[in-house]
Image (tube, rainbow, N blue to C red):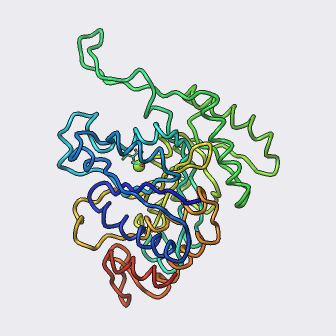
Amino acid sequence: MSMKIAVLPGDGIGPEITAQAVKVLQALSNAGLPLEMQEAPIGGAGYDVAGDPLPDATLRLARDADAVLLGAVGGPQYDGLPRPMRPEQGLLRIRKALNLFANLRPAQMYPELVGASTLRPDVVNGLDLMIVRELTGDVYFGQPRGIHINEQGEREGFNTMRYSESEVRRVAHIAFQIARKRQRRLCSVEKFNVLETSELWREVMLAVAQEYPDVQLSHMYVDNAAMQLVRNPRQFDVIVTGNLFGDILSDEASMLTGSIGMLGSASLDANSKGMYEPIHGSAPDIAGQDIANPLATILSAAMMLRYTFAQDAIAERIEAAVRKVIADGMRTADIYTDGCTRLGCAAMGDAVVAAL
Ligand code: IPM
Ligand code: MG
């Protein structure tokens, strides 16, 4: 049975970085892995061809596929569009439509890149944490929302933070199961001291914890978590948190490693169908120059093989190939330091294929 992958390159550097991940997948396919890949536009590219950041045909392709590989969306040329037409809406809608409620964002330090972090090596050396961000609820999707005229006759913007028990429970299970495969420490991050949403979140976490007596559960307020991440990030193994807090904390965590261009992510539904994308954005300022770092997208493809296709050995082969090119001193511009070999985006893709 073939493994069907929908490839959605998106905007900015999206097409060049996904092309490198596709190159790696193609090499595995040539060696016998039964992969079937098909491409479709999303984000600004979707708007350009179909007047919609998530064209029907793209959603259909993604629904029919076992997994989705996404580049990045967004660009300044789309900033003036009405909100429903903006590239980011394509991303939010596909997450919701495919029910991808569990977003896994690992932050791992490569020993050779310790110097690229803005934090001291003794703080970040050996860092290896996983953020599990809830992805289809919270203030991102909560109703009511809008901008209206309030009783004082003034314009007022409003959004609604809300989580149902079942939404918290399902992401809790994923987080506990991931913690089980790691150091068995799970930190649930919320704002229990202020928000009812967080009160319910914590109650459900405690209830689900009963089923995982082998995992140590702790709780932390989000402001403290933001501080602890830069003070002593190695205290964390797995963090589970809501959509908005997870958006913020995962950007912070990624930068601890000094290289947002190195980190992939997985967004999973209840049946391990997943969308895989680098955690960085579309970087329109460097698009089309062949200087972007494709490693985050290549590592996202590795996550795809692990989480959707249960091909752990092949996922590890890709990850080992990335470690080898880094160990051999090959660097794209974002992680370049003196004495290394500077490669463009496509050459980096070739280097990973060669190291496979
Ligand atoms: C992310 C991004 C998105 C989000 C944006 C582009 C809508 O920041 O994937 O973290 O906020 O979820
Ligand atoms: Mg974000």
Q: Quadrant of residue 304?
A: bottom right
Q: In this view, does 188 lie to the left or right of 210?
A: left
Residue positioned 30% across, 9% down in the render: 151
Q: Quadrant of residue 108?
A: bottom right
Q: In this view, does 191 lie above or below 177?
A: above
Q: Is residue 212 above or below residue 163?
A: below
Task: Give 76 or 277, whichever is nearer the viewer.
Answer: 277
Q: Residue furthest front?
A: 1
Residue 185 rendering spot, x and y as whole percentages: 71, 54
Residue 225 appearing in the image: no
Marker count (numbered): 0
Residue 50 rendering spot, x and y as whole percentages: 24, 42
Q: Is residue 165 above or below residue 18?
A: above
Q: Is residue 163 left or right of residue 74?
A: right
Q: Residue furthest top?
A: 151
Residue positioned 49% across, 76% down in the render: 30
Residue positioned 53% across, 55% down in the render: 105
Q: In which quarter of the image is residue 126?
A: bottom right
Residue 204 rendering spot, x and y as whole percentages: 69, 33
Q: Which residue lies furthest to the bottom in this view?
A: 339
Task: Give 221 or 170, whichever is nearer the viewer.
Answer: 170
Residue 149 rendering spot, x and y as whole percentages: 26, 14
Residue 189 appearing in the image: yes
